[in-house]
Structures are given as C-alpha cells and as structure tokens.
Amino acid sequence: MKTILVDDMILDLQLFELKCADMTDFEIVGKFTDPLAAIAYAQEHVVDFAVLDIDMPGMNGIELARRLRQLRSDIIIVFATAHPKFAVDALKMKADYVIFKPFDREDIIDVLERAKLFRQRQKKRYRFHTFGLFDMEADGKPVRFRSGKAKELMALCVYRNGRPVSIHEMVEKLWGDDAADSPENTGYRRTIKELTDSLKACGAEELFLRERGSIRVRVELAESDYQEFLAGSMEACLKFQGAFMQQYSWAEGAVYGLQERKNIMLTEKAAGTK
C-alpha cells in the first residue's frame, strides 16, 4: 500500500519509517511535516494509507484527515498521538485506528496488519472501467460476455449508476428509436438472458436485478472510475481524458457533462492551493 506519514516532528517520522523499513507490503511514498504539502501530494498521487499526527500547528491531523478523505474516500487513516484526549475526536471522524506515542515496533506491526485487513475488506470483487472503452473485471479477471449486446446492456446499467433501466429505454439505446415501438422484434429478452448467463459464469449474478418492467445493476457491490469520479475523487478526475464508454454512441452525450465537472473540480483544486 502506498503510504504517507505526516508529523511536525521530523524525528517521529524517521522513527516510524525505520521501524517498518522491512515491511514490504507498505511503500512509504511521502513524509511531510507540513499538512498542506501532504494534501498537495495526495491530489496528484495515489495514497492508500496515511499515518497522521494529530497535534500539529496550522492544520491539525483531524482536519488533514477530513481533507484527505475528500480526495479519496477509501483512504485508511491512522492517527499517531501522544495525547489520549484526542482519541475521541479521532473516533468521531471515523479514523480506522489510533496509535499512542511513544510507540515501539510491535505497535507499528499491529497498525500495519490492521491496515492490510481494512484494505482487504474495502476491496470489492467487481470493477467497471468506463473511461475509454467499457470493460468489466471480476476478481481481477476480465469478464467475457456472451454477446456484444449483453456487454452493452451492462454498460448502460452502469451508466445509470444503479437506477432502474426500463425495457423501453434499453431497447431505445441498444436498438434505436425505431425499435422502441416494437421491442419484441429486437430479442431483448435473449440479451437479458445472455447478460445473466455471462454474470453467472463468473459468479457475479448478485450484481444483476430484474424487476417488473426494468433491470438494474447493484453498483454498491462494485467499484468503477465513473463512480469514483462522481464521488469527487481527484485521482479519477485526472484519469478522465475525454473518452467515456466510447464504443457506444448513446454514451457520447455524457462526455460534455463529465468534462464540465472535471473543469470545476480542477478549478476548485487550484483555488484551494493558493
């Protein structure tokens, strides 16, 4: 996991790094005495795990944690503090763990093991890729769909971000306006079955729900660059380069809105660093 350390005491930073130097699961990518420098780094780089001092001048660790969570909602936050009185504040902002100074190697091993468990629990089995061409992974492996229409139907459900897709909308998007008046001629039932069979083949049938007159995907069981972007992730924002599910013409209309949102996020980021 890519890890940053933030503490106004350089000695504490060096001590923490020294005690976990041989723990290969953790890559310390940044050490900062200035919280603003840590935020600037996190805006441009992937950060999975942050160990933060609480009592720091200027911006305390609680506020820093809030700012980091705004950039990446799934970042693991551990506070390192010499003041037990801060533990309540740490728990209120839903920190993952608190370690008290002075700490020894066993304390750090415990923290890092807990961080690995937190990351494993956060990781979801399914991931959708929407920036560029649409694709899906289950357990880290590409999902093979029974047909192109089945894959396109999954893409449409992901685009709807968990909201129901009516049969009329499905037919209109996948077969065109003219087909919407006679959906039975499109074979849409076969496409739904092909999608269902595709998901069953990789043990992902829990994702797909058929309801009366509509279908939808349980996006809460998956992760995607699109969801992360909508949630305000700067990392996902930077990944968007003007292409969204580009093999499907019905997705072209979303590009303008995504680009506009990206511009707003970048403007707000620039204003916040001044």
Image (cartoon, rainbow, N blue to C red):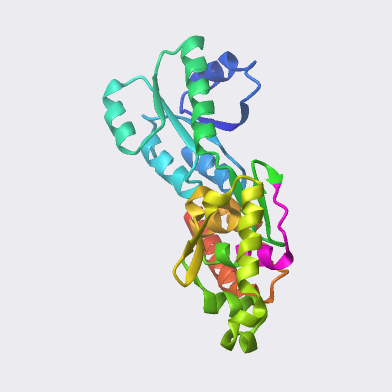
Task: Kindly identify the residue that appears in the image at 71 percent across and 68 percent down.
Answer: 246
Give whichever of 104, 161 is nearer the camera: 161
| Residue range highlighted in magenta | 142-155
**Image height check: is 69 above or below 80?**
below
Q: Is residue 42 left or right of residue 175?
A: left
Task: Kindly identify the residue that appears in the image at 55 percent across and 53 percent down.
Answer: 234
Instruction: Give x and y (percent) for residue 207.
Output: 53, 53
Instruction: Give x and y (percent) for residue 265.
Output: 52, 61
Instruction: Give x and y (percent) for residue 43.
Output: 56, 48
Give whichever of 186, 18 is nearer the camera: 186
**Image height check: is 114 above or below 231?**
above
Residue 218 within the segment the image draws in magenta? no
Task: Kindly identify the residue that appears in the image at 51 percent across and 43 percent down.
Answer: 39
Determine if residue 185 is in view.
Answer: yes
Give whichever of 244, 145 is nearer the camera: 145
The N terminus lies in quadrant: top right
Determine if residue 130 is in view.
Answer: no
Q: How many numbered discs?
A: 0
Give whichever of 236, 207 is nearer the camera: 207
Instruction: Give x and y (percent) for residue 242.
Output: 67, 67
Task: Kindly identify the residue that appears in the image at 72 percent across and 62 percent down.
Answer: 133
Residue 151 within the segment the image draws in magenta? yes
**Image height check: is 235 above or below 117?**
below
